[in-house]
Image: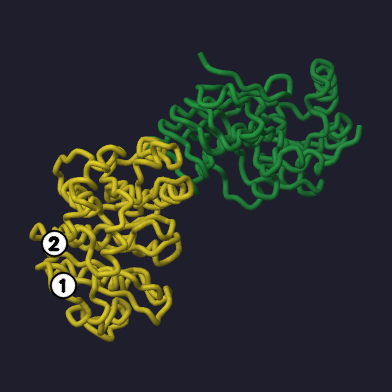
Amino acid sequence: MTKILVVTSGKGGVGKTTTSASIATGLAQRGNKVAVIDFDVGLRNLDLIMGVERRVVYDFVNVINGEANLHQALIKDKRVEGLYVLAASQTKDKDALTEEGVKKVLEDLKADGFDYIVCDSPAGIEKGAQLAMHFADEAIVVSNPEVSSVRDSDRMLGLLASKSHRAINNLGAIKQHLLVTRYSPVRAEAGEMMSVEDMLEILAVPLLGVIPESHAVLNASNAGQPVIMDMESDAGQAYEDAVARLLGEDRPLRFMTAEKKGLFSRLFGK
Amino acid sequence: MADSTDTAFQLKGRMLTLMVFELHNPNIVQLAMKLKEHMAQAPNLFKNTPLAVDLSPLQDGFKVVDFPALVSLLDNHGLTVVGVIGGNEQQRTAAARARLALFPDKPGRSSADKVESKAAAEPAAAAAEPASPAATDIVMRQPVRAGQQVYARGGDLIVEAAVNEGAEVVADGDIHIYGPLRGRAMAGARGRGDARIWCGSLDAELVSINGMYRTRDDLDPALLGKPAVIEIQNEKMIIRALG
């Protein structure tokens, strides 16, 4: 059974692509066959974060338009077995995506025996974002601990509950998860950021994880390596926890208090 | 008495409110007497009010309605008849001849409701809409989220979870919110001054009943975050803590 995950947020710059890359990589590291698709047509980023930007020949839109077949467009990751990237087109615009086209690609991936398809949604609530979530079975809503991001996430959760394929066809609700990113325990304690409790109270969906604000994330994207592969880093470990929880494991939250973070930076010497 | 539908609609902000006048007996003389009594009891009740005449309570015995006389009688009491609801073909033809709008069907609640609390659609929308279904209460088990709008047409709205910031809940009747109200809530949307809003925690962007409203800035800070009920008393919006 193929599971389709969408990573979405409404707001831009909160860490959707970082999350898509790390979740997809983490799932593949655990022996799953995973495809991660960049739905941000025209502003592709996932290929950079995954470090495959120099190997893109055909993209998602080429496949939809029948200009290439799926196997030509899927880029196999060289580090993790079973991980494939489908890049977005840089030259086309969002209208290049159609519901039928997306459906066809997802069906083909299912037929190919993929265990997980991770859809990296563009920001906003326009067509690209709607298509990214349309066929999802589960959604990871990424939110930063600040008011505008939480409100946009709330909007996204509402759309997931009403506009998705599952919702429209009464196939049961999409399983929703909240992933808090760029969390700074120091700033939350100082009251400069929303606390995770406040976010959960408003959004009322189960917490998949809390990713601390970390230099490792920027370093990882510069290096074209999903941050989950940097297991020395707090962010990498937090993503690893999130993947474990996604697969049903019970893991306590880490990196949630200022003291703990201090301890870790001491342990790992930053 | 001056009357103008513009004045009445301005009171309602986004929603235009329309009274429904249930006609049980079309005898103009008897109506005139009853109206006079009614106005004596509550002189301001019908001041400057647009009105739709509901013909459905008319018994079979009363087939003919003298619309020009009815319109002028109600006009004398400050009521402007804009159209009719229900009625048979003959009555509706007569109403059309008197230049009254024909509403497709009887909207709102059962005829057991009091005349003065009767809900009706705003004229333009109602004219274009298909026949409205019977009164429906809506129960929401999930949070109402930013960008979502829920409207309990002709009924009450019950939300078992939160109404979040950026969400809008509207009911022609009452609104019950068991979680926090952080968004906008509008009860009595089509003209019911006795509608109320209950919420588990008051943190609203806006609350409105029958067109009267308060924004977040106008809420008493002492009530914020507390369970509260919002109602209209003596044409004033009252917000009080529950329990």
Q: Are marks 2 and 1 in contact (CB under 8 Å)?
A: yes
Q: Position of residue B7 (x, y in %)?
A: 82, 40
Which color scheme did the rendering employ for the protein? by chain
Q: For residue A28, which numbered disc appears in the image?
A: 2
At mark 1, the secondary structure is loop
Mark found first going from the N terminus, 2 or 1: 2
Q: Position of residue A255 (x, y in %)?
A: 26, 43
A35 versus A91 height, above or below = above
Name which residue lies at 90% across and 35% down.
Answer: B2
Name which residue lies at 32% across and 41% down.
Answer: A205
Colour applied to chain A: yellow
The quadrant of the picture occupied by the N terminus of chain B is top right
Q: Nearer the viewer, residue A44 or A217?
A: A217
Residue hosting label 1: A77
Q: Nearer the viewer, residue A50 or A135?
A: A50
Please state the chain letter of the residue tagged with numbered disc 2 in the rendered image.
A
Q: Position of residue B50 (x, y in %)?
A: 77, 38
At mark 2, the secondary structure is helix
B29 versus A237 height, above or below = above
Q: Nearer the viewer, residue B102 or A10?
A: A10
Q: For residue B181, which numbered disc appears in the image?
A: none
- The extreme right residue here reads B1
- Residue A56 horizontal side relative to residue A134, left or right: left
Is the residue at mark 2 from the same chain as the one at mark 1?
Answer: yes
- Residue B58 horizontal side relative to residue A41, left or right: right
